[in-house]
Image (cartoon, rainbow, N blue to C red):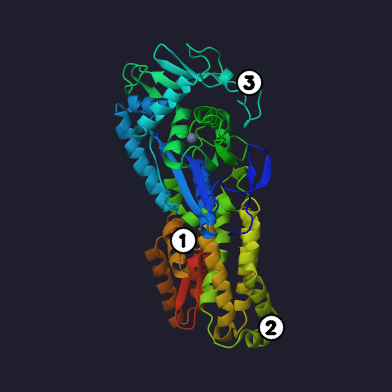
Amino acid sequence: MPAPFRLYNTLSREVEAFTPAEPGKVKLYFCGMTVYDHCHVGHARAMVTSDMVARYLRHRGWDVDFVRNYTDVDDKIIRRAAENGEAWNELAERYIQSTQEDFRALGLAKPTSEPRVSTSMDTILEMIGTLVERGHAYENEGSVWFDVASFPEYGKLSRQKVEDMRQPDEAVPGKKTPVDFALWKAAKPGEPSWESPWGPGRPGWHIECSAMAQATLGTQVDIHGGGLDLVFPHHENEIAQSECAHGGELYARYWMHNGLLTMASGAKMGKSEGNAFGIKEVLQVFPAEALRIYYLQVHYRSPLPWNVDALPDALGLLSRLYEAKENASQMEGTEAIPAVIAGLGKDAERVVELASSFPEKLYAAMDDDLNTAKALGMAFELARAVNRLSNHKKAKKRGGPIAKLALDAFDVLAEALGLLQLSGEAFVEEVKDKRLPPLGLTREGVEEKLAARVAAREAKEWDRADAIRAELEEAGIQVMDRPDRVEWRIRLDVREEA
Ligand SMILES: [Zn+2]
């Protein structure tokens, strides 16, 4: 069994030792996307967080049942579809496809199950029926409301007093008290509806997740996650619904919430704020792993500022890891490690020290409430040591056995955190594909300049050759003269014009 894993529980506001209900098995439910638009970098942080926790726990040998839903019946979807003159379900399907495309591009592991509201109607109706039967919900003119007064623990997650709470649908008539929330909304003309014992209508937002979690994972989940903005009312309401429907059984043993992306001014990121930054736009000009490293370089619970330098900086960090991976993979030799250290000295010793303790230290950081920032810090330290060793003139010939330890460490990083999934060469090519257009360059253009430089050198026109090189460097291209060829790559300290 894995070593103790500790997780911050929003319910207790403490980092707790993690014990799932069933030894070795983790039931993980993460609130997914409401599909009325394309994903932006704010959503992706939550999705990468869900991927990170599922991926890490699986890597550590837990059997993880990972459920992430799609909310495909919702006010925003219906409103957007009406604006477009499109059927609501066609719009939702279109955005589910778009979202799945984004998730694949982001390298997210596939959940065990991805339920949708539109295909979970039976469970939703059954759960609402139970709540009505047990006196936790009441019907009024075809709508069903959750009776907050019937659940004294209401507010335990967000730690608010009922009298201080405001539900978003507070002004809707038909409720006993303003804090009651909708489980079932009576059909309105022009809106999609389903038959129910209370007449035609559609489910409220919160009941969807309670019902989908029950249908896929049972009455209790081990970890329930989502963005910090979901604590109230969404997760508070899920607790009320599920615990009342299940006779008081604790709904989620641990609640995990990722911090939100903030704009430089401190304003929240979101579509309604008009400052969204789409995943498709971002991944057109940056590798997906740059975005992942940008998220993972801070603790998942911290707010994460978004600014214009965020991704260029993250790409710079990522490229250092790839450079180390590439350098290590080029080292050869078959001597015993002590002989290699004797030959290459202190830098070699340092790589051995960092690489051989890497998995243990990475697990210690990650077992402490998923401290990806600390884990990445150790990876950068190892990368620096490898890159330093590679400057040693005998490293390529003799460093192999030591480099193998570093490569094993990078494999652990790859599996546990989803980074370094490409070969060094493939990474360099991806960076070229994505970064040349924003620099206003093309591969052909660069190759032409390099050919002109070769011609100048052959003609012994050294000044002209140097001028071409300087021009390329200025434009953002690093030129590297190898004994048998000229290589080039994108200079990662250069940023495109704002
Ligand atoms: Zn949810």
> Which amino acid, mark 3?
Val
Nearer to the camera, 167 or 378: 167
Whole-angstrom CA distance, mark 3 to mark 1, is: 52 Å
**Which of label 3 and label 1 is nearer to you?**
3
Q: Which residue is mark 1?
A: 431
| Residue 157, placed above or below residue 370 | above
Q: Position of residue 188 (x, y in %)?
A: 35, 16
Above/below status of 471 relative to 68: below
Labelled pair 3, 1 in contact (Cβ < 8 Å):
no
User: Which callout, 2 or 1, points at the residue further toward the start of the chain?
Assistant: 2
- Answer with mark 3 or mark 2, whichever residue precedes in sequence: 3
Q: Position of residue 158 (x, y in %)?
A: 63, 30
> Helix, strand or loop at disc 3?
helix
The residue beneath circle 2 is 345
Label 2 sits on a secondary structure element that is loop
Q: Earlier in the sequence, mark 3 or mark 1?
A: 3
* Disc number lying in front (3 or 2): 3
The residue identified by callout 3 is 162
Dot 2, crowdedness within 10 Å: few (<14), some or many (≥20)? few
The image shows residue 335, relative to residue 221, as above or below, that is below
Q: CA distance from mark 3 to mark 2?
A: 66 Å
The quadrant holding residue 239 is top right
Visible residue check, residue 493: no
SS state under label 1: helix
